[in-house]
Amino acid sequence: MKKLVLATSNKGKVREIKELCSEYEVVPYTDLIDAFEIIEDADTFQENALIKARAVYKALGDENAIVLADDSGISVDVLEGAPGIYSARYTGEGADDKENLQKLMQDIKAKGVTSSPAHYTAAIAIVTKGIEKTVHGWMHGEALTEAKGEGGFGYDPMFVPLGYEKTLGELDEKVKKELSHRSQALKLAGKILKSL
Ligand SMILES: O=c1[nH]c(=O)c2ncn([C@@H]3O[C@H](COP(=O)(O)OP(=O)(O)OP(=O)(O)O)[C@@H](O)[C@H]3O)c2[nH]1
Ligand SMILES: [Mg+2]
């Protein structure tokens, strides 16, 4: 089984990527080396994913390692695309998922609406010897001003995917597995991984 090293410290992503890449041995980099801070200072999901994958590839010191990073976020139409690449830091550095979720619901409410079209984006970067590749996936839907359910992570309790009437917090996890920005991007990443 080929080993994939994940350049992430987000447990929700690790859980989903393990589920979605079951034909690989998926290992978070923190199982191999000490966690270190990676500054995600680019202005696109794509570049931030590359920053994370390159940093971990270099730190591992194993030129044959295959490193995969995910940079993702939610963009809300009524907020002109915010929080976007700032989704993890919406309430500031070190913000937690619950604070970010509350702020996003309040900011949408402050626009005088109870919901807004929104979408998630995931950029996946793969870095290995002589190779740097990126792919994207998206999931469209509606962001609510009320959180419902406990499933998923992050903003999922306030997000209703297009074609559904319940949030990702309430829906069976199979729905997110099929539809999500991350699963769409990983389907494309799978083609790259097979060619390595
Ligand atoms: O409800 C959600 N369901 C998802 O499927 C999802 N995907 C991304 N997000 C949000 O976007 C931020 C990513 O920021 P991000 O890519 O920098 O990740 P992160 O900082 O959490 O971990 P790392 O991979 O950088 O170590 C995360 O914190 C989440 O708030 C999601 N929220
Ligand atoms: Mg991050």
Image (cartoon, grey):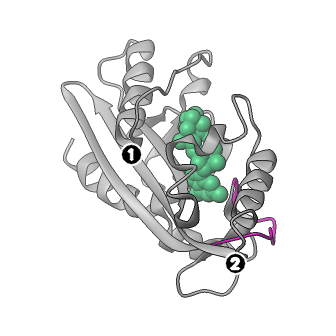
Q: Is residue 86 above or below residue 158?
A: above
Mark 2 Cα within 10 Å, few/some/many (few <14, many 20+)?
many
Q: Amino acid at mark 1?
A: Ile
148 and 79: which is toward the camera: 79
Q: Position of residue 37 (x, y in %)?
A: 58, 18
Q: Is residue 38 above or below residue 98?
A: above
Which badge, 1 or 2, comes first in the chain's sequence?
1
Residue drawn at x 69%, y 64% as measured from the top left: 108
Magenta stretch bounds: 143-154
The numbered disc on residue 56 is none
Horizontal side of 151 relative to 74 (left or right) equals right
Q: Position of residue 188 (x, y in %)?
A: 30, 58
The numbered disc on residue 171 is 2
**Mark 1 lies on residue:** 124
Is 40 inside the magenta-drawn segment? Answer: no
Which secondary structure dominates the residues rendered in magenta? loop
Q: Quadrant of the C terminus?
A: top left
Horizontal side of 81 relative to 144 (left or right) equals left
Residue drawn at x 45%, y 22% as measured from the top left: 56
Q: Amino acid at mark 2?
A: Leu
